[in-house]
Amino acid sequence: MSQFSSSFWDVYISVITLVSVIACGVLLKLQSVRKVAGGSTETTGHTWDEDLGEYNNPLPRWWMWLFYITIVFALVYLALYPGLGSWKGLLGWSEVGQLKQEDAAAAAKYGPIYDKFAAQNVVALAKNADALAIGQKLFLNNCAQCHASDGGGSRGFPNLSDSDWLYGGDPATIEQTITDGRNGVMPPWGPVLGAEGVKDVASYVISLSGGAADSIRIARGREIFAKTCIACHGADGKGTPALGAPNLTDKTWLYGGGEPTVVETVTKGRQGHMPAWKGILSPAKIHLLTAYVYSLSHP
């Protein structure tokens, strides 16, 4: 990759940019000083609708000077701001620097508010209207894309407004989930169990939550489940929060509880990723966000 980090490209980009801008000015100048011999108006020879001719007149002065202004503006801009390779501009501006300045200003303005709420426990904040109003804004800006604006979730993204939790719904666990993220892995069992074995264990899993399934497949699936699935989901199928393994005995399904979907899950496995928000949101913001998420299932 060294060829893409060479200083040659800085020079190349700078030269191409400057030559292009200057060439526009030269072209404009050449097109605006052309004289027509004898004072007559020259046409291009193109005529439409019998008498609508195309004349070769000079550019209007107002348009020409407007174009010159844009060229001067471009040169001034390239001198003041980054735009020519690694040139940082006379003003030394950068989007990263501006972001840091805006973050610092926001921290100075709103920091005391977050610090006030950071000293309170999550359960108390979940009943505080002012804290929930801020927490809701944090949720809508950072979490609603996956979990929906009301926290109801969608296929593959957990519903945060019910009492079903993969890793646990207590304040400390929610805060840890938001801070560090989660990586849920359901291994693919299709190559191990085969098509019939997958259908058998899927039938048993469906039956755990009261779904209708073939009794013969349920019996065979129970034996397969005991050998391959209890390590994560437990002997009773109620899951293991420490591993994020879901409870299979309720009627809550992350990807769907129909037979085709359960068969697909067992066959291909699932990969669930919850990104870590530490480093993106401050601890005080995560604390308020935790309170809001907690309030969704504890109204």
Image (tube, rainbow, N blue to C red):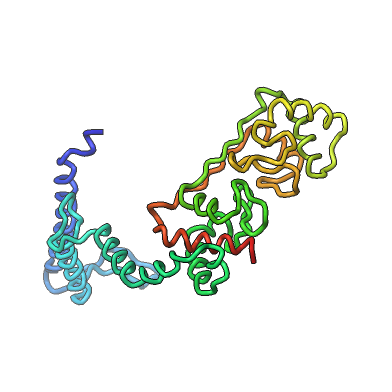
Q: Residue at x 19, y 71 (%)?
A: 64
**In the displayed structure, would residue 170 be above or below residue 239?**
below
On screen, residue 166 versus residue 83, left or right, reads right
Q: Residue at x 70, y 47 (%)?
A: 253
Q: Position of residue 61 (x, y in %)?
A: 18, 75
**Res. 5 in view:** yes
Residue in front for this viewpoint, 183 or 169: 169
Q: Position of residue 196 (x, y in %)?
A: 77, 25
The residue positioned farthest toward the bottom in the image shown: 62
Residue in front for this viewpoint, 35 or 285: 285
The residue positioned farthest toward the right in the image shown: 215
**Quarter of the picture holding the C terminus:** bottom right
Residue in front for this viewpoint, 25 or 139: 139
On screen, residue 170 versus residue 49, left or right, reads right
Image label count: 0
Q: Quadrant of residue 215?
A: top right
**Res. 58 in view:** no
Q: Residue at x 54, y 74 (%)?
A: 129
On screen, residue 172 versus residue 245, left or right, reads left
Q: Residue at x 63, y 50 (%)?
A: 165
**In the displayed structure, would residue 128 be above or below residue 277?**
below
Q: Position of residue 112 (x, y in %)?
A: 36, 71
**In the displayed structure, would residue 269 be above or below residue 134?**
above
**Quarter of the picture holding the N terminus:** top left
Q: Quadrant of residue 247?
A: top right
Residue in front for this viewpoint, 23 or 9: 9
